[in-house]
Amino acid sequence: WERTRKDLPAMTAVVEMASNALVGFFSYPQKLPPPIWEPTIVNMAASTGLPTDQFKYTVALLSGIPIGFLFKLVTKDPWTVKDPQKPTAILIRHCVCAAVGLSLVLLVFGWETFHTLFSSTVAFILMWVVPRHQVHIIVSVWAMGYMSAAHIYRMIVDYGGWTIDFTTPQLLVTQKMMNIAFALYDSSRDPEKLKKENKQRMLSAPPSPAEFYGYVFCLHTLLAGPATDFNDYLTWIDGTKRKGAKAPVIWALLGKIAFAIFAVIMFLVLLPKLDVSLLGDPEWLDASPIWWILTVNQVAMFLMRHRYYFAWVLCDAGCNAAGFGYQEKMVGDKVSYAWNAVLNVDYPAVELATNFRSAMTGWNIATSNWLRRCVYERAPKGFELMFAFGMSALWHGFYPGYYLTFLSCALFQETARLLRRHLRPRIPLHITPVAFLYHSSSTILTLCSLNYLAAPFVVLSLEKSFRYWSHLYFLPHIIAATLLLIMTNIKAPKSDADKAAAGKKD
């Protein structure tokens, strides 16, 4: 940077001017007098030993469950009221969602909440004034542009830091803005070209202010996700999802609270015993044997995932307490139900994954759905994975580690798909010991690969990421790339499903 400053003074002057303007804009709310409740919260956080940002965030997550019960208590289920009263009941629910969510976000993030309110309001205006066939592009550029600017600001003022600030809810708001924009765009397309899911979720008109802000600031989906689809939010608010069904939620809540306690033990008690930053420390890498480096990588990544599980499962529990997340299912000939419609992680699908696709779809499910609906299914054919993983990296920020992780995931997932396609038809899975060996080997390889690829996501910098991977000689990458080249030039055998389809055709 110093060399660039000397060689290209004009360019560096422009960059510095832009960065100063960016910092000035995003840091302005912090220059305002602190909210009147801030000193009390700081003292409470100090008494617990937690940093203030983590204390406020954790309290907000824990409050989601009682607030959910209160929401059901103070609002009426529109499905159960008479028709003339339904619009009022629905409006009240939207307004309570917006007011409670905005109040709690203000409590946690202070005046930085301005960014969430400002960016979403601009998106709301765009949804009303931009032509329907262009709204998905304009809103996406605005949402991702604002999110990207916020990431750059964070890198300038807190490089490599893990402080919880307004960028946390901004990630979810970005998804929500794009969800609505693409649903509006689909209403301008030829119905014959739409998939069944697109037809179900498309919007014929922009949302009202109450609907929009209720969705954006819905407490249970704003702090950590899931950023549910707009249609899912509407069917919860108006009661058409549950249709007045009596479905006790207590056992689902107790199970999720128990899992949250388990997750806390994993990342608060066990994770501190392993310093994840060591994976980018050259002295530690040089002094440690390969087997210990791999052990630390595998165990630390496994434990660290529980930090996300904790937040997601608490938000899911809060949704359930408010009546959000009800899902009917068929068990034999009978209709049953489950509280898993807004589940954001499928723990067995991730931690016992037999293939990359299972792990990817089971992790951060709402984000996977957002990427699938807004990116993957709309990307040029043959580039779907690259576009989806590239958008995921951009959404997370600009640390090189994010791009190394997600773009490598695209390589490994495609390799795993082709490998499975070539191997599975050749393996006699009807023999129990062979099937067990095949599936257990797949699980071990998948999890080891995921943990290897996740290291840059944690160490963040390009130098530390390459330092860790080079210590393993990039062998997993080399093997994956070699297998991909080989399998793309070898015809895969027909699976049983292909043979059955061919038989029916004959």
Image: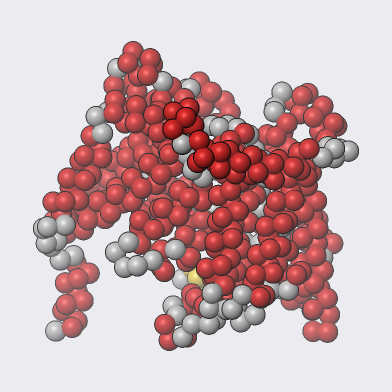
Q: Residue at x 46, y 85 (%)?
A: 190
The answer to whether residue 124 is left or right of residue 346 is: right
Image coords of residue 45 (percent x, y): 76, 28
**Which of 130 and 11 lies nearest the eye of the viewer?**
11
Image coords of residue 63 (percent x, y): 75, 45
The answer to whether residue 309 is left or right of residue 257 is: left
**Which of 201 and 146 lies nearest the eye of the viewer?**
146
**Which of 188 and 125 lies nearest the eye of the viewer?**
125
The answer to whether residue 497 is left or right of residue 65 is: left
Q: Looking at this rendering, what residue extends furthest in the right direction? A: 36
Q: Across the whole image, how many numbered discs are drawn on residues?
A: 0
Q: Residue at x 19, y 81 (%)?
A: 504
Instruction: Judge whether 503 appears above or below 428 on screen.
Output: below
Q: How is the image coloured?
A: secondary structure
Image coords of residue 342 (percent x, y): 58, 59
Q: Residue at x 53, y 78 (%)?
A: 133
